[in-house]
Amino acid sequence: MDSLRNAPLDMRLSAFIDNELSETERQEVEALLATDMTARALRDSLQAADRLGRDAFEAMLKAPVSLDLVRSIKTAAPPRRAISLPEPARVPWRPQPSFGVAMVTSLLMFGLGAGAGYMAAERPKMTTYADMAGDPTKAWLDDVASYYRLYSRQSRHLVEIPANESAHIVEWLMATTGVSFRIPDLTAQNLEFMGARLFSAGGRPVGQLLYRNAEGEVIAIAFTKLIAPQDPDAQMRQIIRDDIGLVTWQGLQANYVLTGPSSEAYLDTLARTVAGII
C-alpha cells in the first residue's frame, strides 16, 4: 500500500490497528504512542469503535431466523441465469479507514441490530421461547420439541401403536392422559396417519398422534391435561425452535401443540383444522 507517513493521525492509527503499516511506519507510530497522550487516547477510541462494530455484527449473526424468512427462502423461485457482459477496466480503489468512518459504521450496525430486534418483538402472534420464560406451559413445550426431534428421525420405530389399531389408541391415550379426543382424518391435507405414542413432558403424560406428508416429513399432534386450568384460549401461538415449528393452543380440557418442520408454511392453517376436529 502507499505510504501513510503524511496521512492524518486517525488514518495512520486505523492502519496501525489493522496491521496495514510497513515496519518503518509501525515503529514510528509506536514511538508516537509512547510519548503522545492524545495519540494514545485516539487509538483507544478507534479500538473501542472496532469492538463495538464486531460485537453488533456477531449479535446479528446469532439472532434467530424468523419463520417468514425460512418459508420465503424455501418457496422462492429459482433465479434466472444472468449473462455476464464485458466491462471496461476500472482503476482499483481502496478505501482508507478513518475514525469518523469507523464510528459511523459501528453505530449504523448497532442501529440495524436494534431495529431487527424491535421488528421481531412487534411481529404479531409470533413468540420465542425466551418470551415465554414465565409461561407455565414452557416446560412441557420444551420436552415436546425434544421428543419430536428424536422420534421424527425414526423410521421403523416412529410410533408405539400403529394406525390400524385406532380404537385402541383412543382408549389407551384417553385413559392415560384423561383427555377425550378424536383422531383427525387429514388425508385431504395429504397427511397419512401413522399411529400414536405416549411420553412424559413437563412431568405430565402426553399423548401424541403422528402423521407423515408426501415428502416423508413428520407432523405431530400432542395434547395433555390443562396445565393451568383457565378459560379456553382459542388464540394460537407460533413458536420456532431451531428447525422445528410449533403451534400451540388451549381447549376446554387440554393444551395442544402441533409440531413440524419450521419451513412448512401451512402449520398454522393445519393447526386450525386440527383444533376443529380433535
Image (spheres, helix red, strand yellow):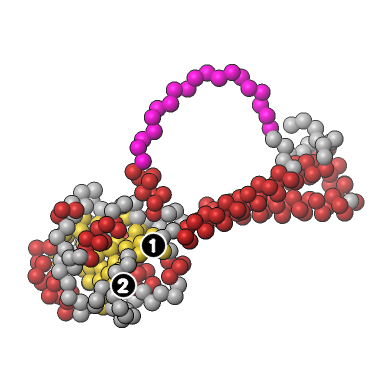
Residue at 72% from the left image edge and 41% from the top image edge: 97
Tag 2 secondary structure = loop
| Residue 125: numbered disc | 1
Task: Please name the amino acid that badge 2 sits on.
Answer: Asp
CA separation, marks 1 and 2?
Answer: 13 Å
**79 part of magenta stretch:** yes
| Residue 233: numbered disc | 2
Residue at 83% from the left image edge and 52% from the top image edge: 40
**89 part of magenta stretch:** yes
| Residue numbers of the magenta segment | 76-94
- Quadrant into which the N terminus falls: top right
- Looking at the picture, does residue 99 appear above or below residue 113? above
* Residue nearest the observer in this picture, 215 or 255: 255
* Residue nearest the observer in this picture, 30 or 274: 274
- Quadrant into which the C terminus falls: bottom left
Please give left or right for residue 3 compared with residue 57 in the image.
right
Residue 27 position by quadrant: top right
Residue at 84% from the left image edge and 47% from the top image edge: 30
Please give left or right for residue 224 compared with residue 46 in the image.
left
